[in-house]
Amino acid sequence: MNLGQVYTKRIVADYMVGLFTLKGKAKMLDPCFGHGVFINSVLENTEFLIDGVEIDEKSFSLFENPNTRRCSLKNCDFFDIEDMYDGIIMNPPYVRQEELNALQPLGVSKQKLQTSCGLMTISSKANLYMYFFLRSILLLRDGGELIAIFPNSWTNTPVGKQFYEQICHYGCITDFINIEGEAFEGSPMVDVCILKFVRGESGNTKYKQMTICPTGVLSIASLNKPGENKTTGLVELQTVAKVRRGITTGFNKLFVNPTLFTRDHLVEILSSPKNIKGYSTNHCKLDTMLAIKDGDVLNEDETNYLENCSSVILKEGKPQTLKSMIEKGQPWYYITLPETAQIIFSYIVRSNLKFVLNEGRCNVRDNFYMISSSHNQYLLLALLNNYHVFRQLELCGKSYGKGVLKLQTYDISDIKIPHPTALSKEDTDRLIKLSEDLVATSNEGKIEAISDILNTYYGVEDAKDKFLELKSKRLTKYE
Ligand SMILES: C[S@@+](CC[C@H](N)C(=O)[O-])C[C@H]1O[C@@H](n2cnc3c(N)ncnc32)[C@H](O)[C@@H]1O
């Protein structure tokens, strides 16, 4: 019986896990875990909880649950699973339609597969991995993410076209990564791709090329922009992290450090880069912010305060947005707190460019960008705090007058960095250590050491000199 037992290399599994933008204790599924490569990677690289399913008794019993608090395992047919998930990751079995009947002894039949995919139109010639993919879509909550690796022979066939149409009906393929080299353990399968699908999402697909060298090093290049150098293996920061602006209050005078006697709806917030010492938000000076959300019950102190504020806003006629909300009788004082980010960056820069580890997991105001990712935070901090990146920022930033540089969110999203999984194990460990030292000591020599390690990945030896030259040109023009 062919159960499509081909196993994903750990480096590829780590890359796939890094594609999730889900946060915290998201609920994940690997519907056919085999030897458990995705389960191990998820447990080691994220905080997610994961369910694993495997139909093959032997594979199931050979894999020992590495963390029974975060992972639960089932020996059953994936098509019997009914739970909903935030994320699904898989290397589904490649079994041709002619071989599907042979799976009857395990309770798998073509009819069961069709039924489990509900109203989706699926060709009777579909391969088992297509059923896996489509059924998984139905088990995703809205906004849920599905990341799968499988052969890409489907892309030019009528069955594949129908498969693609069904997928697009339920959301968007946000990433299509074509793989060159061997993604599977000892396997000769060549044409493989990774798809990332987000349920309920619309938009464009990012096309990328992954190259896996025989030495095990993995590099990624974006195929969307013509002329981009495909050999460097550098990727845009946005492929591994999300960059957002901090919290906008709409009227800081009212919301930040409000004159309230009660603290029921006050949260702490970092509102100025001046309040940070070094490269960590630990021990930074915090302000308070009034954060009321829909459904909260206001106390008398807050009701009086907001009434006073609305009279002032109406009298002064500003801020315009709040004024018109008050006039229309709309709730004008709600503030939604986003999830805090691992790294923050103050985007108006005079002298020091620096990415700060948000160790205190502070809320931050909109004079910071928030950078979140499922990759190791110290590694990402090293990939940002170095002269290769500072030089890019000097080049793309806009003048904000008097030598001050302003960086937009897209400037930060577009920064080119080596993909975290493309680094050698030794370099990864060294970068993490240097980053930890930088946070602990604020010693800028660490930035130089980080930059030196990254020289080979950027193919540049003199990033520091180039950065200093650009910076001094910017500053001396205004002296
Ligand atoms: C391509 S392998 C992938 C294994 C592992 N996830 C990896 O990437 O290394 C597919 C796995 O699916 C399992 N499998 C096949 N049909 C299944 C089904 N209906 N339900 C659950 N697991 C199944 C096979 O036993 C095999 O271990």
Image (cartoon, rainbow, N blue to C red):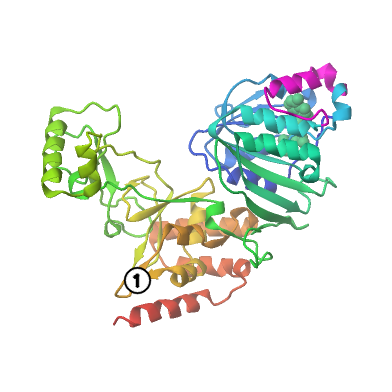
* Ligand 1 shown in quarter: top right
Q: Quadrant of residue 306?
A: top left
Kind of residue at badge 1: Ser
Please tell me which residue is depicted at 13% across the width and 35% down the height of the picture: 307
The span shown in magenta is: 102-125
Give the percent coordinates (x, y) of residue 316: 12, 49
Give the percent coordinates (x, y) of residue 64: 68, 29
Give the percent coordinates (x, y) of residue 173: 63, 43
* Total numbered circles: 1
How crowded pointer 1 is (Cα within 10 Å; few <14, some 14-19, many 20+) is rated as few
Please tell me which residue is depicted at 85% across the width and 25% down the height of the picture: 100
Magenta span contains residue 115: yes
Q: From the viewer's side, name the closer residue of 85 and 376.
A: 85
Q: Is residue 376 left or right of residue 476?
A: right
Q: Is residue 301 left or right of residue 471?
A: left
Q: From the viewer's side, name the closer residue of 391 and 323.
A: 323
Q: From the viewer's side, name the closer residue of 151 and 342.
A: 151
Q: Is residue 125 left or right of residue 223?
A: right
Q: Look at mark 1 in the image and give the residue it sits on.
A: 351
Give the percent coordinates (x, y) of residue 74: 67, 22
SS class of the residue under badge 1? Answer: loop
Q: Is residue 61 visible?
A: no
Please tell me which residue is depicted at 88% across the width and 22% down the height of the picture: 102
Q: Quadrant of residue 120?
A: top right
Q: Quadrant of residue 99?
A: top right
Magenta span contains residue 181: no
Is residue 74 positioned above or below 376 on the image?
Answer: above
Is residue 376 positioned above or below 393 on the image?
Answer: above
